[in-house]
Image: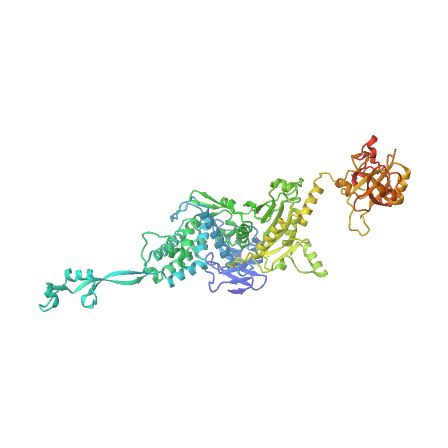
Amino acid sequence: MEKVQSIEIDLSHIDEGLQLFIDAQKKGDIEVDTNNSYEHEPTYQLKEGCFYDFEFSHKNENLSKNYRLFCSDQNNIVKNRKRKEHIGVIAPNIFVGTLTLQILNTENPKKLWDLQLEVQSKKTNYRQDYQYMLNDITSKCTDLIIQANSPVSHSFETDYNTDNKTLYQRFAFVSSIINSDDFEDAVQRIVTSPTTNWTEEAEITDVRKIKRFKNSELKSLINSDNRLQLKKTHPLNRSGIKSIATKIETYRKFESVDTSENRFIKHALETFLKFCMDIANHPNAGTRLKEEADLVSEKLETQLQHDLFKEVSIPTTLKLNSPTLQRKEGYREILNVWLKFDLAAKLVWNGGDEVYSGGKKDIATLYEYWLFFKLLEVLKHIFEIEPKELEKLIVPSNDQLSLQLKQGKITALQGVYTKANRNLNIRFNYNRSFKGGTDDISKPGSWTTTLRPDYTLSIWPTSQSETEAEATEQIVHIHFDAKYKVANINQILGEEKSDNSLDNEKQQNLKGIYKNADLLKMHAYKDAIRRTSGAYVIYPGETNKPLRGFHEVLPGLGAFPIKPSEDSNETIYIENFIKEVLKHFLNTASQRENIAHKRFNVYKNDIPNEVSEPIPEYFNTDKTEKIIPDETQILIGFYNTKSQYDWINKKQMYNFRMGSGNGSLVLDKETVSAKYLLLHTHKDKSSGDLWKIVSKGPKVYSKENLIKKGYYNPSQDYYLVIELEKVNLSEFGNNSWDFRKLKNYNSGNASAKPFTASLTELLKTKI
């Protein structure tokens, strides 16, 4: 490949003297395949994301103005100048693959000429990645069809009454199998080390060369033609044998490659070849498809030219249960391909147009589709759930199979994990949309705009339905987005930035340039989609970097590398992460679950309380216990006489009766956790006599204990006593409150009975 900055394309086949000039902004953004390194790709190659100036030129300058360049399949790729439309800009943007442009002469607008340019991905290994991922998807889909016992019959008649796009899809699946390195290696193993057997071959042999005669050969010696008279003195003449044959039919053993297994291999290669030739000759096949089909046909013809196949005859039966076919290296791979071939030839991918239609190589979208299957394998293994929902991916229709894997479609794995201390519902979605703008926070969705992550893993306890789990904050969504074009972790998470770099970034943002857009998108998923505890990028890099929001694996953000490769450990990082997530969910005392429960209790009220009165920020001096009005309980207590109040004020203690009588204290959760005591007495309509409860809880005092403390004439045997500290009422605005308006207040004789109220309730009764 020669790297250049400008190219000159000769268009003399359109008009003698016509040329098209294409200029890049910098050298190396255009490559010319002078050595035909990539046979099925155009010679001139651009790069995605770059801009190229073009201009038509003619030896007659006036004629050059009659030509236009445009792209009928992709909008905004070609932009012509308004006043000089024969000049413009080619902007491939994210398009990758063969870009077909059209050339138009304004004087003959009905006739168009195609101009093909190849657009390379910025990632140098995209061709290998593309082929590997397409092979892998094909393999998984055909495995899925076989497992599902698809009712579509197996035959090798390629009579397709369909359009060019569908033909290309079918050929793409089949060619992805045949063009794979595994297929090539399998054929090489067979031709270099074929299976053989010993066989006998009949031949006419001079009897003088035979050292030992078999019974059949003795019979031929006596009965065959071309006989020789024996002398009377010959020993055989004495036995009545007057003559013998000079040449007889004998059998020799030799090692033959004409075995049933080799016949099958030859039959399989010829079947693949016939399919490719039929595709190339199909009336609906376009130029690109014909070229690629011819290339695969040439490869198969070359393989069939090996000497091995010249000695192999046509099979009469196919013994697919042969141990050699099923076990020997090379043979078992070809058998596997052959079993999948007919299914792949019938497979039509709804969504495949986005990836490879007309020579397009949408590597980023293919990576997203491929990751769907990789994540599915990981989740199936970890949660031990059979993906029954996958049967819906392959839909039989007439004589074709439709792969329902398309962006915007929900394709889920779901089941129950029951292998540990807690049963969990597991659900995995592809391209699930979370509807935006819904006011009901108990329902799934986004509170801003509709968002659609590539993959969503949802987990919730089996004790609740999915609807209930959403409403009670018990479901958790974890999102993943595929980012093939990210090459380095710093493109996602960035590095520590100086003030200058942050200032520069802000200026770029003002111009609409967002370098950390992927990271911002993960934040958008986490913050906007309800019940989301994690959002992560998956990219084909090296560095694994999950970030934890607090002390546990969730909530979090980050990135996981998964490369398209044969490496069996390619998903190891994300596997370990999901195992950690599972362990986290089996911990019913996790901080995340505790917060989720509290969040539900806080947000369950449609109309939030409002407190605009002055209150202290913290309950204690070390500022570790924040005062939350809804959760801060106030104990409203009664004192009978002034002497009793003096004792309370002096001892900073308050006593309650025990038992079931009037004025006895009920030890419920609110009472035990009360932080303040509000005192009142006879005929009080309001009170501002507020005390802080400093004891950890009420203590039991006997009558004798209270007498020792100076309490006058206790009437009960036992009391509950709390320790107090006078409140600086200025912290509460020097207010007093009408405690009679509190819902737990009892009038009449029961008015002396102690009760509780939240601080929020009390503040609303301010006088």
Q: Position of residue 665 (x, y in %)?
A: 79, 38
User: Measuring 49% from the left and 45% from the top, which residue is drawn there?
Assistant: 391
Q: Is residue 569 visible?
A: yes
User: Measuring 48% from the left and 59% from the top, which residue is drawn there?
Assistant: 42
Compared to residue 530, the image places residue 100 above or below, namely: below
Q: Position of residue 95 (x, y in %)?
A: 55, 54
Q: Quadrant of residue 509?
A: bottom right
Q: Is residue 514 visible?
A: no
Compared to residue 23, the image places residue 142 above or below, namely: above
User: Measuring 57% from the left and 51% from the top, which residue is drawn there?
Assistant: 76
Q: Quadrant of residue 712?
A: top right
Q: Position of residue 356 (x, y in %)?
A: 50, 52
Image quadrant occupied by the C terminus: top right
Looking at the image, which residue sits at the far bottom? 233
Q: Position of residue 340 (x, y in %)?
A: 43, 51
Is 401 or 711 nearer to us in this picture? Answer: 711
Looking at the image, which residue sits at the far left? 232
| Lateral position of residue 319 relative to residue 406, left or right | left
Q: Quadrant of residue 399?
A: top left
Is 597 or 87 nearer to us in this picture? Answer: 597
Which color scheme did the rendering employ for the protein?
Answer: rainbow
User: Count of labels shown?
Assistant: 0
| Lateral position of residue 758 relative to residue 480, left or right | right
Looking at the image, which residue sits at the far top? 748
| Lateral position of residue 64 relative to residue 434, left or right | left
Is 174 or 445 nearer to us in this picture? Answer: 445
